[in-house]
Image (cartoon, rainbow, N blue to C red):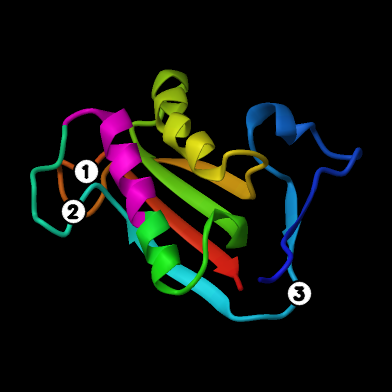
Amino acid sequence: MTEVSRHNPYTLPDSARMGYTQVTTAPAGDLICMSGQVAWRRDGSPVPDSLGEQAQIAIDNVRLGLEAVGAGPANVTAMRVYVVGLTAENSAEAAGPLAGFFGGPAPCVTMIGVSSLAMPELKIEIEVMGVK
């Protein structure tokens, strides 16, 4: 497995307190680019109303996509999280499943507020890049 290194330079704000890393590096390897994952499931079951539940399903989909290419959370170098109507309150709700996914230091993570996603019932979309 490729060694992904996480860096929080003393010259930048202490992002570790907020649960993400300022800079992630990895040696050359197979680049992983994953389409944004939402709260859609293979069985077509309905999308829940709760942002937290949607975040959990989306992160589960990220995990499944990574596993399909022989990778896992440690291979992720960057993550973008798009949240409809982002506020401080729903930012925390969305971040919960992300912390559980990484189980330790997270890579570079950017949370972005958007007005809508692909379908009206969707509240979160998670896009990742990685290397293995």
Numbered circle sitting on residue 122:
1
Numbered circle sitting on residue 27:
3
Give the image location of residue 8, x and y in percent: 81, 43
Q: Amino acid at mark 1?
A: Leu
Q: Which residues are magenta?
A: 49-61
Residue 104 counted in the magenta span: no
Numbered circle sitting on residue 37:
none
Q: Is residue 126 left or right of residue 31?
A: left
Per the image, the residue denoted by label 2 is 41
Residue at image location 26% in from the left, 49% down from the top? 117
Foreground pick, 45 / 67: 67
Residue at image location 21% in from the left, 54% down from the top? 118
Residue at image location 32% in from the left, 30% down from the top? 52
51 w.r.t. 41: above or below: above
Counting residues from the start of the chain, the first of labels 2 and 1 encountered is: 2
3 w.r.t. 6: above or below: below
Q: Nearer the viewer, mark 1 or mark 3?
A: 3
Q: Amino acid at mark 3?
A: Pro
Counting residues from the start of the chain, the first of labels 3 and 2 encountered is: 3
Q: Characterize the magenta stretch by its predominant secondary structure.
A: helix
16 w.r.t. 66: above or below: above
Give the image location of residue 112, x and y in percent: 47, 42
3 and 2 marks in contact (CB < 8 Å): no
The quadrant of the image that shows the C terminus is: bottom right
Farthest residue to the top: give it.
89
Foreground pick, 83 / 115: 83
